[in-house]
């Protein structure tokens, strides 16, 4: 049985959260002398001299409409990376608890666990990049607080089988995070609509990928109110700046443009995958549900270095277990993809 109360760290349960000036006042006012801001203004035309809404109410309201999830199930972080860190801080006792990851996967789960002194247990993906459910089950014990699943997975690009994810959600009594950073590029259904069925589910999404706002730093965690309230208690009071809130609101008014970009990127992903598969040194192009492609290529490290001489940077994953000899290539613009393919052809002419 999943009991959230047993998962929350004792010090967090006892924590009296910081109460900001803007928390203690609500209602209409004309004169704000409560937060030691610069009352004269700022060098900018906007009201950036004022602290932002610590609860990001307007932004959550709009996200709620677009995603069909009530605002009380939404937490906003300074990138998903902040959500990852806060989940560890809320639920994992340093030096005592452990967490399970399924490598090869996004690196920050492990780094963040290490920062928080949380033991990392690994249930590597199977050869087809799907979950090893037996291994996962064997690794979990009473101190396992969070399992991290990434779907579509970085760096492999595939989505995890839905039944496997459901098996974890049904059988594991801790928190199951499904990182859906790349979900917009996938035909697979998000787990967002499953939130009401699984009190242990956290779905993470981000503005960094399909929304094209990696520079803004805005990530979302969707979960039960108990989990969201705990994250809210621990987060820095003003973790999402005024500019970020305003720009995200503007972006959310342009879902049409984002959908067009998603279509264009997924079309270009197919075209690039086809062209890459024709290149003689390319041994395998893995199917992708994301905006990148994992490619197995002879002498991957040397190819990586060669691409650098052409001022093209891809991600070398050749030393990562199960991704031996692989490069991870983000789908670029038409011109960038052509430059990449031309450079690979040049490499082939020189070396094959
Ligand atoms: C799977 C996955 N999750 C999260 C992130 C980070 O997201 P954010 O930019 O919101 O911190 C990345 C970035 O590459 C990612 O690949």
Image (tube, helix red, strand yellow):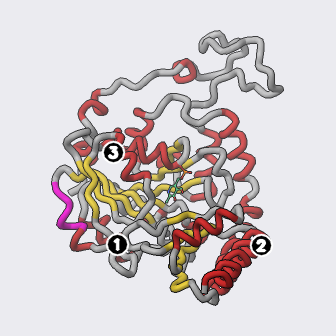
Q: Is 65 situated above or below 15? A: below
Q: Nearer the viewer, residue 310 or 4?
A: 310
Marks 1 and 3 sit apart, C-alpha to C-alpha, by 21 Å
Please give the name of the residue rendered at 60% of the width and 14% of the height, measured from the top-left corner.
Answer: 35
Instruction: Identify residue for label 2.
Output: 334
- x and y percent of residue 128 in the render? 39, 81
Q: Residue furthest right?
A: 45
Q: Check the picture and name the quadrant holding the C terminus.
A: bottom right
Q: Secondary structure at mark 3?
A: helix
Q: Magenta segment range?
A: 136-141
Q: Nearer the viewer, residue 144 or 2?
A: 144
Q: Is 181 situated above or below 218? A: below
User: Do tag 1 and tag 3 residues touch (Cβ < 8 Å)?
Assistant: no
- x and y percent of residue 328 in the render? 55, 69
- x and y percent of residue 295 in the render? 54, 77
Instruction: Identify residue for label 3.
Output: 114
Q: Is 143 situated above or below 50? A: below
Q: Is mark 1 within 8 Å of ligand 1?
A: no
The crowding category of the residue bearing disc 1, from other C-alpha atoms within 10 Å (few below 14, some 14 to 19, many at least 20), is: many
Magenta span main SS: helix
Q: Check the picture and name the quadrant holding the N terminus.
A: bottom left
The crowding category of the residue bearing disc 3, from other C-alpha atoms within 10 Å (few below 14, some 14 to 19, many at least 20), is: some
Marks 2 and 3 sit apart, C-alpha to C-alpha, by 39 Å
Q: Secondary structure at mark 2?
A: helix
Please give the name of the residue rendered at 25% of the width and 45% of the height, measured from the top-left corner.
Answer: 7
The crowding category of the residue bearing disc 2, from other C-alpha atoms within 10 Å (few below 14, some 14 to 19, many at least 20), is: few
Look at the image and tell me whether residue 70 can be seen: yes
Instruction: Identify residue for label 1.
Output: 125
């Amino acid at each position: 049985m999943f009991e959230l109360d047993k998962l929350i760290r004792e010090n967090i349960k006892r924590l009296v959260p910081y109460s900001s000036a803007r928390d203690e006042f609500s209602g209409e006012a004309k004169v704000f002398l409560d937060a030691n801001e610069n009352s004269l203004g700022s060098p900018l035309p906007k009201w950036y001299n004022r602290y932002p809404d610590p609860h990001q109410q307007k932004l959550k309201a709009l996200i709620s409409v677009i995603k069909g999830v009530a605002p009380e199930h939404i937490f906003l972080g300074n990138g998903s990376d902040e959500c990852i860190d806060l989940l560890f801080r809320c639920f994992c006792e340093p030096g005592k608890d452990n967490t399970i990851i399924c490598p090869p996967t996004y690196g920050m789960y492990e780094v963040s666990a290490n920062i928080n002194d949380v033991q990392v247990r690994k249930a590597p993906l199977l050869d087809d990049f799907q979950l090893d459910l037996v291994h996962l089950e064997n690794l979990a014990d009473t101190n396992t607080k969070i399992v991290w699943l990434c779907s579509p997975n970085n760096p492999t690009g595939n989505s995890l089988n839905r039944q496997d994810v459901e098996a974890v959600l049904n059988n594991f009594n801790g928190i199951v995070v499904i990182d859906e950073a790349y979900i917009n590029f996938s035909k697979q259904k998000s787990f967002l609509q499953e939130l009401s069925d699984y009190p242990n589910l956290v779905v993470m999404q981000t503005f960094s990928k399909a929304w094209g706002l990696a520079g803004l730093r805005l990530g979302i965690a969707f979960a039960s109110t108990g989990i969201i309230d705990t994250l809210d208690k621990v987060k820095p009071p003003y973790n999402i700046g005024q500019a970020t809130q305003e720009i995200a609101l503007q972006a959310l008014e342009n879902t049409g443009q984002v959908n067009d970009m998603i279509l264009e990127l997924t079309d270009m992903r197919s075209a690039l995958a086809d062209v890459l598969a024709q290149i003689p040194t390319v041994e395998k192009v893995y199917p992708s549900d994301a905006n990148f492609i994992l490619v197995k290529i002879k002498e991957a490290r040397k190819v990586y270095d060669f691409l650098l001489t052409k001022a093209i940077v891809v991600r070398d994953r050749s030393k990562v277990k199960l991704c031996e000899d692989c490069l991870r290539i983000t789908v670029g613009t038409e011109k960038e993809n052509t430059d990449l393919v031309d450079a690979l052809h040049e490499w082939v002419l020189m070396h094959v």
